[in-house]
Amino acid sequence: MNSSFELSTAMGTLPTIAATGIMVWAVVEDMRTRRFSNRTFLISLALAIVIVLLSGGWHAMVPGSLGLAAGFVILLPLVLTGVVGAGDMKLMAAFGVLAGWHAVLWTVVYGVVWAAIFGVIQILVRRQGHQLISNLTTIAVLKTRQGLELHRIPFTVPLLLGWLNHLVLTGGLR
């Protein structure tokens, strides 16, 4: 193989590697501090923009911008309802610059499935099935979450698993 082919192949995988790195960084920070800081967001966003420009030039910023917007738009309803934190939304926005809107969408969909699985496991391990039924009844009848004992998990872990699911299902891990 010639060196220009190898370089273009490596530059094509660079955004995927960087997106995965940002996700792993977010998981580590979330597990340590229970948040994805503004500082980490800004560093991730700057890194994502540089990598997109290096690997695809200025025209690659169009799909990168759509990915950024998707990260905000797709997670905003979940943030406004308190299901996830704003840090998760910022993570997906920075991630979206590298991965694109389609990957943001599917990463969130798969991430929600993983979060549900983790939530059920947490409920079973803690033997809190009665609390789940009480919470669901309160939400259904009273249409409020005030005063409920809610189960919390760091959403970055399901998001990372959602991203890995997306990579496997789209052939991105060859």
Image (cartoon, grey):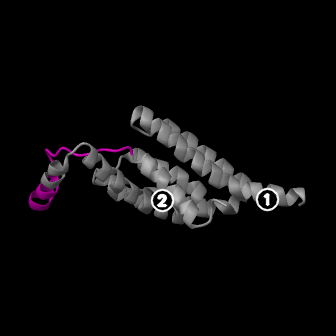
Horizontally, residue 152 falls left or right of residue 51, namely left
Q: In which quarter of the image is the N terminus?
A: bottom right
Residue 58 in sight from this viewpoint: yes
Q: Which of 119 and 52 is in front in this view?
A: 119
What residue occupies the far top of the structure in this picture?
A: 32
Identity of the amino acid at label 1? Ser
Which is the main secondary structure of the residues drawn in magenta?
Answer: loop
The image position of residue 160, as x and y in percent, is 49, 51
The residue located at (11%, 55%) in the rendering is 138
The image position of residue 159, as x and y in percent, is 45, 52
Q: Tell me if residue 86 comes above or below residue 106 in the rendering.
A: above
Q: Quadrant of the C terminus?
A: bottom right
The image position of residue 86, as x and y in percent, is 38, 47
Horizontally, residue 110 falls left or right of residue 123, namely right
Residue range highlighted in magenta: 135-154
For marks 1 and 2 on the same chain, the one whose residue lies earlier in the sequence:
1
- Residue 140 falls within the magenta-colored stretch: yes
What secondary structure is marked by label 2? helix
Q: Which mark is residue 107?
A: 2
- Residue 111 falls within the magenta-colored stretch: no
Residue 145 in sight from this viewpoint: no
Identity of the amino acid at label 2? Thr
Q: Quadrant of residue 35?
A: top left
Q: Residue 8 carries which label?
A: 1
The image position of residue 133, as x and y in percent, is 15, 55
Q: How many labels does the image show?
A: 2
